[in-house]
Amino acid sequence: MIYLDHNATTPLAPAVIAAMLPVMAGVWANTSSQHGPGQDAKRRLAGARATVARVLGCHPGEVIFTSGATESNHLAVRGLLAAAPASRPRVLFSAVEHAGHLRLARALAAAGVPVDYLPVCPDGALDLAAAQKQIGPDVALVSLMAANNETGVLMPVAAVAALAHAAGALLHVDATQFIGKQPFDFATCGADAVSLSAHKFQGPKGVGALLLRQGVPLLPQTQGSQERGRRGGTENLPGIVGLAAALEALGDIPAEARRLTALRDQLERGLQAAVPGTQVWCQHLPRLPGTSYLRFGQLSADVVLQRLERLQVAASSGAACSSGASVPSHVLTAMGVSPDEALATMRLSLGATTTAQDVAYLLRELPPLLAPLRCEAPLSLP
Ligand code: PMP
């Protein structure tokens, strides 16, 4: 099977499995226990925290372990908002945040919180001029992703940090798709809080972190003594050790980014040459190295994915979290793309397991499978 869905999740790196297995088997005591085994578990936790802090450029006290990016995003937005002064009730989300994060935005709005959305331009880039107008003195928090999970577009984190801070607001960044694929340094990134998730960079599922700048007030959303009272609940030590091992195993990120960019560009150009009507969204914007978001004319993405399945290629239509539901991508909708074009769009996301042979195979096998489909009348879409 050729796996081209690395933005949905990634396989565990061998070094991660090697680090986790002995902890699962032997270091199972509670990190809060005072006895010897508990203290051993506590030391392992501290070691993993130190590794995360070193690799991501923050202080160990700035790392709050969570169950993944969804929880980190919730903790950041709800926790920072609850600690904000009453004169700053508003929160801004970009219109293209992850679907789960936008559910949180809608839940807050339904509960009476003033919520607004930062728009994107038709090309998929954040509309900075609009953002500048929207970030006013009543805003507590801006929540912006570092890289979009569908288009791969890199967002202007430093510029929005400057706008937010000039207005006295905080910036939360969902870096779930960014960390592991691009160099990252918390100390200089400009954000006050950053979400990450281990399973996007060859770590285990169900574990992540919120990096929170020292001194920034946050109200915990789950009560307990762990994580210095900021996130209660017995820590998932094997997962946390796996997260740290995955970060340590990342290697030369710029070199891997160059490799994936070259493969991605070769794939896109090859498909554009062989399949008339192929359109790659956001092709000319700075994007994540391995992400390709494209459509073949009006061919339904579901039909193309079925053909890919026959070729033993795993890919997805837009966000994995909404696959199965035939709703046009909210990201493309925010860009002003028609529902028909959005429903024809699919995502190929390359990663550590992707080889030049995989790309050659796809370029050889996919165009002939699509040719007869394109001769039929355009599929009527519901
Ligand atoms: N944010 C982004 C940008 C994502 O891509 C994802 C995963 N699809 C999430 C948040 C949610 O991450 P997790 O699975 O760790 O909750």
Image: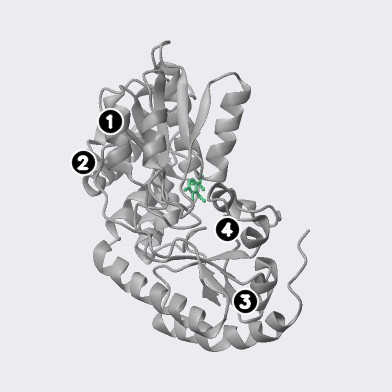
Tag 3 residue: 308
Amino acid at the residue labelled 4:
Gly
Quadrant housing the C terminus: bottom right
The tag on residue 318 is 4
Tag 1 residue: 213
Q: Is 39 in front, or is 377?
A: 377
Dot 3 falls on a residue whose secondary structure is helix
Quadrant housing the N terminus: bottom right
Mark 2 or 3, nearer chain start: 2
Distance from the alpha carbon under mark 4 to that under mark 1: 32 Å
Dot 1 falls on a residue whose secondary structure is loop
Dot 2 falls on a residue whose secondary structure is helix
Q: Is 220 in front, or is 229?
A: 220
Tag 2 residue: 188
Mark 4 or 2, nearer chain start: 2
Residue at the farthest top position: 86
The nearer-to-camera label among 1 and 2 is 2
Q: Is 278 in front, or is 94?
A: 278
Amino acid at the residue labelled 1:
Arg
Say few, some or many: other residues with alpha carbon within 10 Å of mark 1 (under 14 / 14 to 19 / 20 or more).
some
Name the spot of residue 158 as percent of width and height, x first.
Answer: 27, 41
Amino acid at the residue labelled 2:
Thr
Say few, some or many: other residues with alpha carbon within 10 Å of mark 3 (under 14 / 14 to 19 / 20 or more).
many
